[in-house]
Image: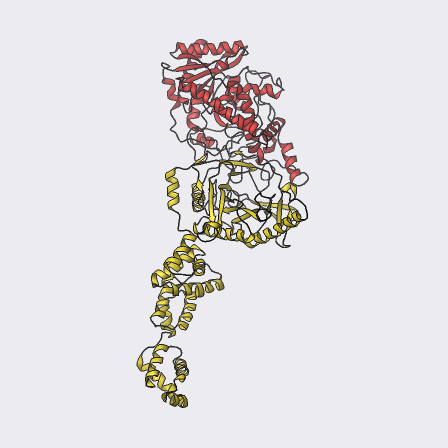
Amino acid sequence: MKDNIATLGLQTTCGSRVLRGYVSPYEATAVRKLREAGALLISKTNCDEFAMGSSTENSAYGPTKNPLAPDRVPGGSSGGSAAAVAAGIVRIALGSETGGSVRQPAAFCGVVGVKPTYGRVSRFGLVAFASSLDHIGVFGRSVDDAALGLGVIAGHDPNDATSVDLPVPDYRAAAQESLRGLVIGRPREYFSDALDPRIRARCDEAAESLKAAGAEIRDVSLPHTSLAIPVYYIVAPAEASSNLARFDGVRYGLRLTGDGLRGMYEATRSGGFGPEVTRRILLGTYVLSAGYYEAYYRKAMAIRALIRRDFERAFADGIHVLLTPTAPTTAFPLGAISDPYEMYLSDIFTATANLAGIPGMSVPAGEVDGLPVGVQLLANHFDEYRMFVAAYALERSIAEADA
Amino acid sequence: MVVGLEVHVQLLTRTKLFCNCSTEFGAPPNANTCPVCLALPGALPVLNEAAVRLAVRAAHALGCEVHGESIFARKNYFYPDLPKGYQISQFDHPLATNGHLLLEGQANDHRIRIHRLHMEEDAGKSIHDRYPGATAIDLNRSGTPLIEIVSEPDLRSAADAGVYLKRLKQILEYLEVSDANMEEGSLRVDANISARERGTSPLGTKTEIKNMNSFHGVERALEAEFARQVELLESGGRVIQQTMLWDAGRGEVRPARSKEESHDYRYFPEPDLPPLRLTSEWLESARSELPELPAARRARFMDSFKLPAYDAEVLTATRALADYYESVVLALGESKVAANWVMGEVLARLKDSGTRIQDFVVMPAQLAALLEMVRDGAVSNSAAKAIFAQMAKSGEDPAAIADREGLRQVDDDAQLVAWIDEVLVAHPDEARRFLAGEKKLLGVLVGEVMKASGGKADPRKVNQLLAKRAGS
């Protein structure tokens, strides 16, 4: 269980010093549902502080290593959950996503990672980073494990006003479906000349195998894709600057004393938050400030609507599932990326789904230089089922190719 | 003087705006809290529909346009009794806009426009005087539902502001939307005030006054700030836009420290709550719950019950009092006597004992029964007052008290004649002169008979019988 999801009896630190030792007096809806379904919760898993990062190096408790290549990162921010599944410690782990924090580490660790539609899984008990982008997601060793986990935690929750009251299909039944009639779109913006040709090759092979299984492959365009990262890095920090205001030393968590109330605030927050969290709070505070709101936040929200519309058009045009690379690289060495902006580009293929609220997942699709590569499948709002149909088929074809 | 008022009102819901915690007043500190109103990590707000219903009722009563879609927004600032570090409020898409409130009767010349009415949550309380050198935080109030009612700058005097607040409070009480008690903090007022030359139209630079604790305090603060602004302007100075704090003890306003006002609240739409959408059917059903409002009731009392404006005003002061009066009228079939008694004996009794009409032990039907006894001559007016005093203590029926205390008027001729004879014998001189035709002695003799009867004789009948004796 990712350490930003509230659990009874175990600390919930969000990988942050500001919550060292904090034990929640209540439990997240997703955790409660898993327990009620008979799951055993064995541990919390490391993550980038408040889920801000793509390598699990931004944790106050030290980095997590990739079990497949211990000199490399597991991806992030849900790196601990991905590593626990990849190492065979657990079959299912929960993570969270704001811009790709389940799918990208799943790709880096060679496991399956699913982010459902916004509203499909309750966020109650998920410590908020950017509320309109946050999702709880599932890691599994197989597509079936992920489908099993998602089926348990999905559904309406009266404690989350943004959760949606729609019936939850049996995702595992998607394993029995044929691919005949399934239309898979290949958005050209995700396959630019800058894409590593070896990762492109794994994606092409995946598309071919789905075609061989009966799906139709079409090229599509999602023209606003390149704006996703700039939009994401306005909207997410803006919401984060507000969501993280509660860590003020008054009621729980770390309190460092300073000169008066203001001094206590400054000492607690400066000492409690790491550099990446501090950077995003400052950025978010700036873009919401009087005189900048229109130029940044409002404009970003307008472009976010265009990104969503790109997907709506593609799905309205008959596309059922989109196929893209999950991440532009394979797992990189620990400490290799120190420039924040370079790190942000890790989410270049995943952040769009968070901005649009559509479901997405990463399925292992071969290797490059002995490191796993993930293929991303995206579907329309609340159409996780068809995404799973494609995922089961892809997993089968990879297994057959390996055999 | 140009004044606009911002009024915050606590809604009378059982639970808070975004969680199921009780809104009950007076619980031990932090007893009425949960993960949501404590802003624990991971907790989320869920909107209380009952609060929306009350807010919409208030908006309807103030003639506002209620919007089918409104949006909650976060108002970000750090304060220890604001647990999330932001207040969930409404900003550029409020629940309702464009209402009005009439200050005097039905005339449109005293129409104060309402700019907007929106919903928001209350903060907790900081307690500075409990522990030396430390501040205690009580979050029982955190998340209590509020509406903020913002008027246009249509008020022209401190007295007008007082009337506006009185009318607004009365409406909110009638609607059962709020206790609207400024002393207890369920109604809070901030005032924007500027000064300009009479007859000129551009608005002067305004200041905002905070920290007023009563309607009277609002009026005094406005007068003080107006005097300050006028003196400043007349001596060639300029008013600076700033926040002023009212000091009731000293009777003066002083500028707030600049830290208390220079906020950039960084409003943005609350992502944890979808836009509030109200269908026209829902809005209609909310409108149908509106009770008769004070102005309409005043007019009806004057019209149907033929009451003077003053009486109508007093008797409609609260919905419960108006209901009480109307029930008495209904049972008695007479409005003027009922008005005199409710405004006189009943209000005096309530005032002396510090009770509210809704807790008064004398039911309207019991008061009507008493007044009926007076009308029928069964008890005298003075006996009725004595009976009422007992009813107000015990809640007994008037007939039972009259019987037990022997307060019924005696109109039995034989008994009356016996008392008359007794008096004539006891005062032979007056008796002789009266029987000889000295009519002015009638009053004296009636008084003596009443005395002899212990106040129980029916004075009208005694009059008649004595007059008959004198042969006239």
Count of residue discs: 0
Residue most extreme to the front: B199
- In the picture shown, does residue A307 fall above or below A291? above
Quadrant in which residue A36 is drawn: top left
Q: Position of residue A71 (x, y in %)?
A: 60, 16
Q: Is residue B320 visible?
A: yes
Q: Is residue B419 left or right of residue A326?
A: left
Tell me the quarter of the picture where residue A237 sits. top right
Residue B295: percent from left, percent from top: 43, 53
B289 and A236: which one is in front? B289
Looking at the picture, how far across and down is residue A3, in whole percent? 54, 29
Q: Is residue B260 above or below residue B378?
A: above
The answer to whether one can see residue A138 in this image is: no
Q: Can you say which quadrant of the picture contains the C terminus of chain A?
A: top left
Please name the residue shown 66% across and 49% down the image.
Answer: B234
Q: Position of residue B302 (x, y in %)?
A: 40, 58
Q: Is residue B74 left or right of residue B316?
A: right
Viewer-nearest residue: B8 or A142: B8
Q: Nearer the viewer, residue B43 or B225?
A: B225
- Chain coloured yellow here: B
Which one is in front, A345 or B282? B282
Instruction: For chain A, give the colour.
Output: red
**Colouring chosen for the image of the structure:** by chain
